[in-house]
Image (spheres, grey):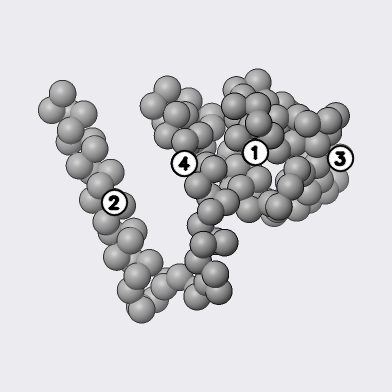
Amino acid sequence: ELSRVEAELSRLRITRETVDEVLSDGPGAAAPVGNVELAVLPLTDLAPVMLAAEASGDATVTSPAYRRILVAFAEAPGPLRCKDVCAAVGLGTQANHVEGMRSKLKRLVERQILAETEPGLFTLSSRSGAR
């Protein structure tokens, strides 16, 4: 239990440092956001997903590549196609990139993080009503 508490304390320290960095006016300060509510609300869909993945030890979902994919879905106004996701995460839209992305998206559908609302069209499960 002590190691669990120490790990939690470490996470809180990192969070505190990140918040201090974001709020500072020094180098690396966050760019001004026009409407904070619009910037934060889409990401609230991700919090339960990421917490559940972390709690279950799902290293795939918590990896940087999958986090970028999930952020792309959180920021999107609606469902996305594979090419749209590739563009959002900075990949090319060549066939090999699109097919690689399709397998990642299908993996997230299997984990019930994404939903395939129609063939080739993906959205966060929490937005599709599947959860």
Q: Which residue is mark 3?
A: 95
Q: Earlier in the sequence, mark 4 or mark 3?
A: 4
SS under mark 1: helix
Q: Which mark is residue 127?
A: 1
Residue 7: horizontal and vertical position, in percent? 23, 36
Q: Earlier in the sequence, mark 1 or mark 4?
A: 4
Residue 45 vs residue 65, the one in the foreground: 45
Inter-mark Cα distance, 1 to 4: 13 Å
Structural crowding at the residue carrying mark 1, measured as other residues with C-alpha within 10 Å and reported as few (<14), some (14–19) or many (≥20) = some
Q: Residue furthest bottom?
A: 25
Q: Residue furthest front?
A: 129
Inter-mark Cα distance, 2 to 4: 17 Å
SS under mark 3: helix
The residue drawn where x is 80% and y is 36% is 121
Q: Which residue is mark 2?
A: 14
Q: Earlier in the sequence, mark 2 or mark 1?
A: 2
